[in-house]
Amino acid sequence: MTILLIFLALFLLILGALGTVFPALPGLPLMFAGAWLIAYSQNYQIVGSFSLLILLAVTLFGMAMDFVAGLLGAKYTGASKEALWGAFIGGIAGIFFTPAGLILGPLIGAAVGEFADKRNVWLAGKVGIGTLIGFMIGMVAKIGAALVIVLVLLAHYIAYWIS
């Protein structure tokens, strides 16, 4: 049973790592679930509850940064409500296209929404670029949080194997 739990935990960690890049998957929650499952499978002797609390905080921080960074990038450039809705709709539409769609969807959506509201091409472009920069910052934070989860787990197991 323990081996099955470990394989399931590794599957969740790998699926979560993929989810940090593809927004259709909840990457960080899946990675945390994998970390918890691997700790549970070994009775919290290698990865303890304090480490899991730290990983939970990292997961929540990464998720918050991913959500807030795009909005702050758009708001910093003076985006309207329509631009924020456009970025949201563009992000959803971008899921169905190549990885370029994931990046360009929110940018184009925010720019179209801002242009529809203010009829100013310069401002629409500025809001689109701000949304893109915020999206990239959120992506970096999410990938960083995923790396922290993996590195903390690796550190625990390396320390266990050495001692």
Image (tube, helix red, strand yellow):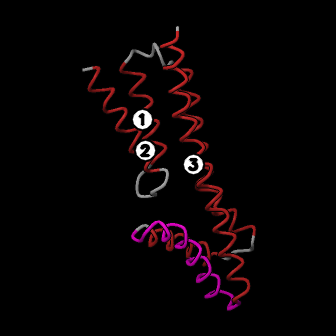
Residue 147: give x, y in percent of width and height. Answer: 56, 39
Local SS, label 2:
helix
- Tell us which disc is closer to us: 1 or 3: 3
Q: Are marks 1 and 2 in contact (CB under 8 Å)?
A: yes
Q: Is residue 37 above or below residue 23?
A: above
Residue 2: give x, y in percent of width and height. Answer: 29, 20
Local SS, label 3:
helix
Answer with mark 1 or mark 2, whichever residue precedes in sequence. 2
Q: Is residue 66 above or below residue 111?
A: above
Answer with mark 1 or mark 3, whichever residue precedes in sequence. 1
Q: Which mark identifies residue 142?
A: 3
Residue at (51% x, 18% y) in the render: 48
Q: Is residue 132 above or below residue 66?
A: below
Amino acid carrying mark 2 in the image: Gly
Decide whether the magenta segment is chiefly helix, strand or loop.
helix
- Residue range (magenta): 96-120
Q: Which mark identifies residue 33?
A: 1
Residue at (55% x, 23% y) in the render: 155
Answer with mark 2 or mark 3, whichever residue precedes in sequence. 2
Amino acid carrying mark 3 in the image: Lys
Q: Are marks 2 and 3 in contact (CB under 8 Å)?
A: no
Say few, some or many: other residues with alpha carbon within 10 Å of mark 1 (under 14 / 14 to 19 / 20 or more): some
Circle 2 sits on which residue? 16
Residue at (60% x, 72% y) in the render: 84
Q: Which mark identifies residue 63?
A: none
